[in-house]
Image: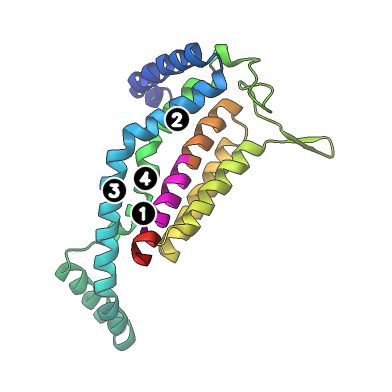
Amino acid sequence: MHAIEFLLTPIMWLMQHLVMLFQTATGSFGLAIIGLSITVRLALTPIFRIAAKAEQKEQGVQAAMAPQIAEAKRTLKGREQFERIDEIYQAHGYHPIQSVSSLAPIALQIPFLLSALFLLTDFPPLQGKSFLFIENLGAPDGLLTLGGININLLPILLTAVAIFESSIRPEMTQATRVRFLIVAGVIAVLIYGLPAAVCLYWLTSNLWSLGSTTLKLRNKTAEEVG
């Protein structure tokens, strides 16, 4: 983990300066973290667009191959089926590994999410700082108490937002949604006990992504109606 943190030092250095810059401008560490998350999303927008185009291309290839693959599975067995499907893949310049392209947006965020995690998990200026309903940005939020047990809501909320977005993205197949759910579930478990500052950063990023997806769907619907 220390090696990864060392490699991410330039990103963490930049993030720290941005957080302090936004805090100076707004007087709030909560707003500073939100501003940092939005800044990172804006910086990554061109890369996200490239990834989206690659994903659409991969889905087009899959759609073109689908009838042939279905026929091969229906009429052939064993090695003959395997070889026929492999021929179809080669004819279309496709490899099954390309099916993970739908996870590209998550993969692209990983260095920045890890940098935010390393920076905000143990960032002394955040200790004791409140924001809206969060009492301490430097500790798990513990926003809900049931039977004397504190429950951290921010990790649950950011995971719910991510899952909801995946459900409304028309380009995602059932298989990619299942993979996304697995990844989201693992991430939720890993971040559950992290400080509220980390979860606030991640929640802002997920809400930005949901807003972007919703806007694209509305524009697409308007074009179809028009």
**Label 4, residues with CA under 10 Å away: few <14, some 14-19, many ≥20:** some
Residue shown at the point (55%, 31%) measured from the top left: 200
Mark 2 and mark 4: Cα distance apart in space: 15 Å
> Of circles 2 and 4, which is in front?
2
Magenta stretch holds residue 209: yes
Start-end of magenta stretch: 208-220
Q: Residue furthest right?
A: 147
Residue 201, compared with residue 175, is above or below; it is above
Q: Earlier in the sequence, mark 3 or mark 2?
A: 2
Q: Which residue is mark 4?
A: 105
Q: Image quarter for residue 190?
A: top right
Q: Nearer the viewer, residue 147 or 160?
A: 160
Tell me where residue 44 appears, x and y as whole percent: 32, 36
- Of badges 2 and 1, the one in the foreground is 2
Could you tell me residue 165's position as x and y percent?
A: 49, 52
Distance in Å between CA atoms under marks 3 and 4: 7 Å
Element under disc 2: helix
Q: CA distance from mark 3 to mark 2?
A: 20 Å
- Label 1 environment density (alpha carbons within 10 Å; few <14, some 14–19, many ≥20): many
Q: Which mark is residue 102?
A: 1
Q: Please tell me whether mark 4 sits on a helix, a strand or a loop.
A: helix
Quarter placement of the C terminus = bottom left
Amino acid of disc 3: Ala
What quarter of the picture does the N terminus occupy? Answer: top left
Q: Secondary structure at mark 1?
A: helix
Cα gap from disc 2 to disc 1, whole angstroms: 22 Å
- The image's colour scheme reads rainbow
**Mark 3: few, some, or many residues within 10 Å (few <14, many ≥20)?**
some
Circle on res. 37: 2
| Residue placed under numbered mark 3 in the picture | 51
